[in-house]
Structures are given as C-alpha cells and as structure tokens.
Image (cartoon, rainbow, N blue to C red):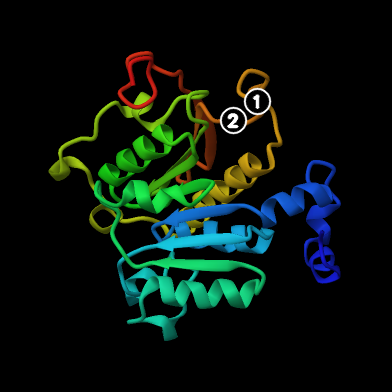
Amino acid sequence: MLTDDQVRRYARQIVLDEVGGVGQQRLIDASVLVVGAGGLGSPAALYLAAAGVGRIGLCDPDAVDVSNLHRQILFSTSDVGRAKVVAGEARLRELNPDVRVEKHTVRVTADNARELCAGYDLIVDGTDDIHTKFLLNDVAVSARKYIVIGGVIRFEGQVLAVRPRETACYRCLFEEPPPRDLAATCQQAGVLGAIAGVVGSLQAVEALRLLLGVGASPREAGRSRLPGGRVLIYDALDGRVRDVEVSRREDCHACGQGS
C-alpha cells in the first residue's frame, strides 16, 4: 500500500497506464545490484533510486578520484578520497530516503559473483572490464536473473538487456572474451563523459521495463522497440542510434541447450 508521500513523490510515474499503483509497488518491492559505481553505474543508480526501486546494491572496490568526476555524476568534488559505495549511498539516500542501499566494497570475482548476485532481482553491469561482463552474464543466466549490460568507449556506447533462456546473452554476442592485453578500457582509450550518462540512463530504463514487465516481448516487438535480444548502439560522433538484432546461439556456453 503506497503512502501519501510515495503517491506524491512518484505521481508522474504512477499516472502512466503501464505503471500505476501496482507497478509502483512492484518497484518498491524490487531489488537491483549495480556493479560498478562509475560512469554507467552512476546515472543508472540515480534513476533507479529516483524511480523508487526499494533496494539497491552498490558494488565497487574503489575510492572516488578527481579523474572520475567528468562522467561519474553520483559524486562531487568533496567526495574525492571517499569509498565510492559510501559516497554513493549518501547521494542516493539524499535523493530518495525510501531507498535501502547496500554497500559491497569488493571487486567481483569468480569466487564471489554468485553470492553477490543471489540476493537481487536484477543486475546492472556498469563495469569497465570485459572479463567481468562475461562473468556477470554467465552468473545471471545460470541463476535466471535479468541483467542489463552496458559499455562505453571513446564516442560510442552499447546496451544489451538479457532475459535468461529467452533472449540472446552477452556470450551469444561475443562468445569468448579477448586476451586482457587486447581489451582497451576507458582509462586507456578515453570516453566522452556525457555518453556514459546516456548509456547508464538507458540501462536504468531497460531495468525498470524488465522489473515492471512492460513493453513488447521479444516475439512481439517491432523494430521501434528495444527488447532483450537487440544491442542498442549509440554513436555520438555521427549522432546516430541503431539497434542490431542478436539471436540466441544453440551452442552458447552460457544459455545454449547444453549449458
């Protein structure tokens, strides 16, 4: 049952036919783990908290550095030197006191990924390491949890929403991670900060759509939709957005028939 304060806070969202009071309560009861409180995780976490997602996990082992501030909008100059999850919790609680924030000051590894993800309904991957993306994808698919994977580098960003066993996963798209010395990061190649804001916001949209169960299913979706199973690609230099359909691979090690 929504309180009067919640009805006022989420009024512009509740008025949507696809949300309503039932949908808003679903968000309040939902939980999302945001892995990587950086350029993608910052806008994603802010919009998830603003929308009323009741429990948000922030997972990041790092402290805020001044070089983060051009794209990591969860933080301010006064946060430099603080643990990202601590500064992030304070910002999200300031934005929406209703939200419960859980802090995970750890790096995701093969040893802890399954346990970290187990307590959440949906995973938002905002990491800058392709091997971690494969790991999170595989864990989410195995546990039948939704995952929204984002990536940015230079002037380009991508988003893939995965409905396990229903749509293509990250491993269907790329199969295997490249050698570490061939996988460039934003630190090495650079990134326009505002692109991270665009892609992280799109990740929040996809997460909310999955939690609410709204929009066309993959079988019903037309080309105007972005269901799981399509990669949205944003090219800021050309000012273009396009989506590429990705089919599930029967031999995929994560979601194929033999997995």
Residue 78 in view, yes or no: yes
Side of 95 relative to 137 (left or right): right
Relative image position of residue 257 (x, y in whole percent): 38, 15
Position in image of residue 141 (x %, y %)? 42, 33
**Would residue 75 be seen by someone viewing this image from the given angle?**
no
Give the structural element (helix, strand or loop) at label 2.
Answer: loop
Compared to residue 122, the image places residue 225 above or below, namely above
| Number of disc labels | 2
In front of the other: 52 or 172:
52
| Mark 2 neighbour density, 10 Å: few (under 14) some (14–19) many (20 or more) | many
187 displayed left or right of 86: left
Q: Position of residue 67 (x, y in %)?
A: 33, 71
Q: Is residue 194 above or below residue 19?
A: below
Q: Quadrant of the N terminus?
A: bottom right
Q: Is residue 97 left or right of residue 114?
A: right
Which numbered dot is residue 227? 2
Residue drawn at (78%, 46%) of the image = 19
Of 177 and 151, the residue lying toward us: 177
The dot on residue 217 is 1
CB under 8 Å between discs 2 and 1: yes
Q: Judge whether 223 appears above or below 143 on screen.
A: above
Residue drawn where x is 81% and y is 71% of the image: 5
Q: Amino acid at mark 1?
A: Ser
Q: What residue type is disc 2 on? A: Pro
Q: Is residue 65 left or right of residue 1?
A: left
Q: Position of residue 177 (x, y in %)?
A: 24, 35
- Compared to residue 255, the image places residue 117 above or below, namely below
- For the point 47% across and 79% down, the residue is 76
Crowd around label 1: few <14 · some 14–19 · many ≥20 (10 Å): some
Spatial distance from mark 2 to mark 1, Cα to Cα?
7 Å
Q: Earlier in the sequence, mark 2 or mark 1?
A: 1
